[in-house]
Amino acid sequence: MPIPTRAAVVESGGAPFTLADVQLDEPGPYEAVVRMVATGLCHTDLGVASGGLSFPLPGVLGHEGAGVVEAVGPAVTGVAPGDHVVLSFTSCGACGNCNGGHPAYCATWLPLNLIGGRRADGSSTISRDGETLGGHFFGQSSFAERALVDERSLVKVDPEVPLASIAPLGCGVQTGVGAVWNVLKPGTGSTIVVLGAGAVGLSAVMAAALTPATTIVAVDRVGERLSLARELGATHTVNAGEEDLGEALAAITGGRGADGVVETTGNVTVLRQGVDALGARGTLVVVGAPPFGTEVSLDVNGLLGGKRIVGLTLGDAETQAFIPALVDLVKAGRLPLHRLISTYPFADIDQAVRDMGAGKAIKPVLTF
């Protein structure tokens, strides 16, 4: 039997989120029904809601969910009713990258998570008044009181940790942390530069502070966010609205350049400045996503000193090990994620969207 619930539906590109009664399909063999407790709001949700990606609308978004398992399909083995879970992206579990521990680069990642709106077999997970809606967003569509979730999106977590405090781990936080830990892997005395002090960038700053890096530079145009970056572990800050970024980074690094740069802004001018700021054998991680088709020009000779530019999806994380480790750090107070979070009742989702767009909220979390 279909499962009734209430969800925030986007009717068309650019339309607001509207609360509506919807029906979830019965869980398939490898799916679970999760009662949502909290879900983060991410720029990816806003990009899809604006019509910037070809996700089928009307639809239900949301991909940083956290909740309690209510029911499981007959083939689910990793979780049981009553378990606390953080929801992340899904993957096929069978391709070379999935088998190699890199499910964020699954061969079917785009249709399964971002643009398909359906299960892998083409069936719908959500309907309204008998009409199918776009769903299965990141295997979860968690802007709803209940979500029908792929088993591979489910990560069992410590029930002692409040779910509203860890919902953002499923996307934004693991992306920023993974950029540092899984790609840059700072050595002793490294210099790490983080371009953009939003949720992903500040997560990268916190991650860098837990490594042997001794110089951590946060760059932004908002003074309050730079002050917060200092409190979270940045040793230096640069206000790009007041200083020349290249000159400031050259001064901080003594002209040697950075060992690692995390680019979170999606601005290709900033990306180019980050590449130019790299030292010999330095690596820039591209996290920020501009519109599809965006290109950037580079000084080819400037790359010959061993510079690397690496694109990144979701921190290149294997979620079943990575997210519980982050939960342990949150619980111990070593990853102060609460400093980024502003909570809103689910019914106030549009206020959360406005506050995020205005820069008033770094990481809105909707609570149920």
Image: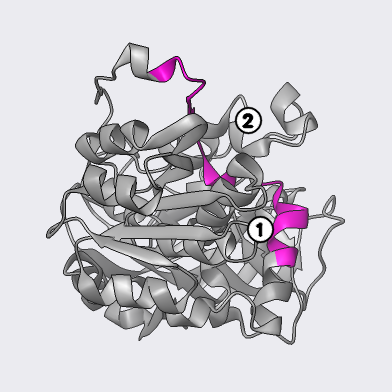
Q: Is residue 81 above or below residue 1?
A: below
The magenta stretch spans which residues? 303-325
Residue at 35% over, 54% down: 45
Q: Is residue 184 magenta?
A: no
Residue at 48% over, 75% down: 232
Residue at 69% over, 34% down: 92
Name the element at disc 1.
Answer: loop
Q: Is residue 249 left or right of residue 70?
A: left
Q: Is residue 49 left or right of residue 145?
A: left
Residue tagged 2:
106
- On the image, the x and y values in percent for residue 272 come to 27, 32
Name the kind of residue labelled 2 in the image: Cys
- On the image, the x and y values in percent for residue 190 come to 57, 49
Residue tagged 1:
212
Name the kind of residue labelled 1 in the image: Pro
302 or 253: nearer the viewer: 253
Q: Is residue 325 left or right of residue 210?
A: right
Circle 2 crowding by C-alpha within 10 Å: few under 14, some 14–19, many from 20: many
- On the image, the x and y values in percent for residue 287 come to 42, 42
**Is residue 366 among the parts visible in the rendering?**
yes
Q: Is residue 176 above or below residue 157?
A: above
Q: Answer yes or no: do the residues labelled 1 and 2 have beta carbons within 8 Å?
A: no
Q: Is residue 29 above or below residue 86?
A: above
